[in-house]
Image: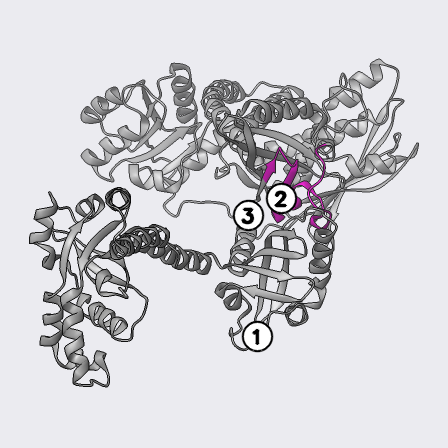
Amino acid sequence: MKFNVKSIYQELVKHIRKLQSEKKLKQNKDNHSIIKEDYRKLFENATISIWNEDFTLVYEQLDELRKIKIPNIKIYLEQNPEVLFSLLSKLKVNSVNKATLKLFKAENIQDFLNNVQSTFGKGADKVFVNLIESIWHNKKSFTSEVNYKTLKGDEFPALFSVYIPQTKLEQKSVPVSIQSIQELRDAESAKRESLINLEQAQKMAQIGNWEWNSKTDEAVWSDEMYRIYGVEKDEFEPTSENVSKTILEEDKHKMERAIGQLMQGELVDPFEFKIIRPNNEIRVLKIVGLQNNEGNIFGVTQDITDRKKIETKLNEAQALAKVGSWLYNPSTQKIEWSDETFHLWGFDSKDGAPEFESMISRIHPDDQEFFINTVDKALNFGIPYDIEHRMCLPNGEQKTIRAICQPILGLNSEVVSLTGTSQDITSHKLLEQAQVKHQRLKAIGEMSASIAHDFNNSLQEMMGNLEIVKLQNNFSDNTLERLNNIGSIIGDVADRVTALQKFGDPEYNDKNSKLLNFNTLIEEVLNQSRPLWKDAMEKEGMKITIITDFKDISKISCNGGELKSAIYNLVKNSIEAMPEGGDLIIKTGMKTDGVYATFTDTGIGMDEETKLKVFEPFYSTKGFESGRGLGMSGVYSIIKKHNGDVIVKSSELTKGTTIEIIFPISQQNEIEVLSKNKPKDKELFSVLWVDDDFLIAEDSSMMVESIGHKCNIVNSGKDALEYLNNNACDIVFTDIGMPLMNGKDLAKAIRNKFGNKIKIVAVTGWDINEKVKDENGIDFVMQKPFTLEELKKILLVV
């Protein structure tokens, strides 16, 4: 250790010895005064603590000890501490300088001299032993570290230095210097702690530093480097050859290229490589810094194996969530992408992150300007963004991307980096659209259900009036046929109204599915569409001939109105395919697969593209004014709904087309519902009809009485209960949708007061399932609009 004490102390000793020499030679008093004054100034103004001590008595006692021929003075003093203390007591402090008073926190010289014995700290006696030993062996100087204490009791380490007097004259005035080395000790402690912390930090971060001399192939590694490589310090010499052996063959070129670039004065970007430890464990390392100083290469290496594992899991999580991350450095114009970001954008990660122009080329043309402007604001003004844009991949796939960016600002509020994510939200957008569509359909469904109820009431009025008219016996066969057609049309409309009720309700239970004869449905459609294929065509001077070939077939379970709508569209499509007229041949029959029907026209036919797309929604060859392209897609939807199938069996341009539909044979047995307790011919029911629509109630009453039963009508639930309290009744027919007290509340009230004595029939245009029936005590449900025949069947089973 080197201190500034030595030069000051040497100068002081020099002056003292000169002074003593001058005394000895008895020079003139003037010179003596000058030398003495110089010594006083040097002594007083020294920046270190200096004591002037008298060693005379110490030397006298040592001379006495020499007479007894002590072989080892140090051992002697340690074995005879009383002698040591005797020697200490013979030391006399003549004076101390100002620096001493400051160091030992003494108020004045006398204060210090009175308490000098209390200034010696722990171990000071051993230092004095060593001093005596140096004097005993005639050493010229003595220096040692020693612990001192201030007069306030604060202990501190110091450097104790003394030039051993060589003459009796020098013994009387011996300068002793004492310099505190507390700051040095603190600095050394801080340095040691810093090194320990650095080593601990390197260990925690798994970062090691090293130095390699490319000329001598000598290397110095930090302790962490040995841990990273999994080797012992005394068993592994970090030469280039030994280090190269640990690097996997596939990555050796990375290290060689980096060293080559460094030797040529080029900057080397951080790079990753893999090593294999002696235990065959493979670790992923990263050179995070390299520097060349005249052949001495300094480097920092980090073990990133655990981080790579986390990155792998993160990449897997990002892949599952379809979220990719990225980081952009404006100063270097370099961008880092996660694996999922490459996947989202359709780029190969082996080629690195693409240029900005390449990215832009994959954004939908309509979104490019918006995207560029948004990124520009983030880059130049630090404005974060959270946007959506479309992406078009080279394979034709289109995605919707949510792009989020957060600028990182520096000290001057300048953008130093951009970090962000890209997320594929295509499926989310589709789900949102589906949910919006569902909500719209639900709203439409609720509205259409309400409209359907009103329609059913109107249809019931029509059906009721029609049935009453048909009760007359003076109609011709032609008139009666047309009246029946009207009834059939009302039924078709009712079925379509039922379909309207299903809008927005996928769990709707179709109450109108019945066992029907397909041949009969086709015949009814041909009768109803007669104006389309006969009257309109003949008016234009053309003729459509309908040829039918119906075989005996099993009945199918279907909604008659919906299926007739599909048949109507098939007939209409065939007629439109024969603008100059022609033949429409309809055949039915049985196959192993079920009941089939073919519709063959002699029209214009279809090309291959039309055959493939004919059942697609909105596809039409007739132009917007002639149709929306929903007819054949509607046919397809209805047939599929009934578990059937529809195909273009054959088609040839200018020669015509054959469409075939096929339905599975229904497993449901056709059972005529007959009452086991059928009333006798003369037995009559007393019926109460409850409906807030007076016309429906009146028509229904007339229909009931035409069968032979007695019927009374009321127009509210309250009036119904009042009637039942005063009159006997067998059956109550009640509408469901009524103000104040609806049909379900009325049914409950009847059950509570009369038990099961009265049969209750709900007459409604709404759907009522079994659970609702049971909860409200309803025996039967009759859907509006109903016919006289349907009313008879209900009265047979009650």
**Number of numbered markers:** 3
Quadrant position of residue 712: top left
Q: In this view, does 314 lie above or below 220?
A: above
Q: Crowding near pointer 1: few (<14 within 10 Å), some, many (20+)? A: few
Q: Does the rendering let one see residue 592?
A: no
Q: Nearer the viewer, residue 606 or 790?
A: 606
Q: Residues within 10 Å of mark 3 (few under 14, many from 20)?
A: some
- Alpha-carbon span between mark 3 and mark 1: 41 Å
Give how far across and how far down residue 510 sits, in percent: 51, 38
The amino acid on which the numbered mark 3 sits, given as a three-letter code, is Gln
Residue 337, which numbered label? 2
Q: What residue type is labelled 1?
A: Phe
Per the image, label 3 sits on a secondary structure element best described as helix
Q: What stretch is highlighted in magenta?
A: 327-356
Residue nearest the observer in this picture, 493 or 125: 125
Gap between marks 2 and 3 measured at Cα: 12 Å
Residue 736 % position (x, y): 36, 27
Against 94, is 393 above or below? above
Residue 741 located within the stretch drawn in magenta: no
User: In terms of sequence position, does the residue under pointer 2 or pointer 3 come before the other?
Assistant: 3
Q: Which mark is residue 318?
A: 3
Q: Distance between the residues labelled 2 and 1?
A: 38 Å
Residue 798 position by quadrant: top left
Q: Are marks 2 and 3 in contact (CB under 8 Å)?
A: no
Q: Measuring 36% from the left and 33% from the top, which residue is drawn there?
A: 761
Whether residue 768 sits left or right of residue 283 in the image: it is left
Percent of width and height locating residue 223: 48, 65
User: Which residue has dot 1 on it?
Assistant: 236
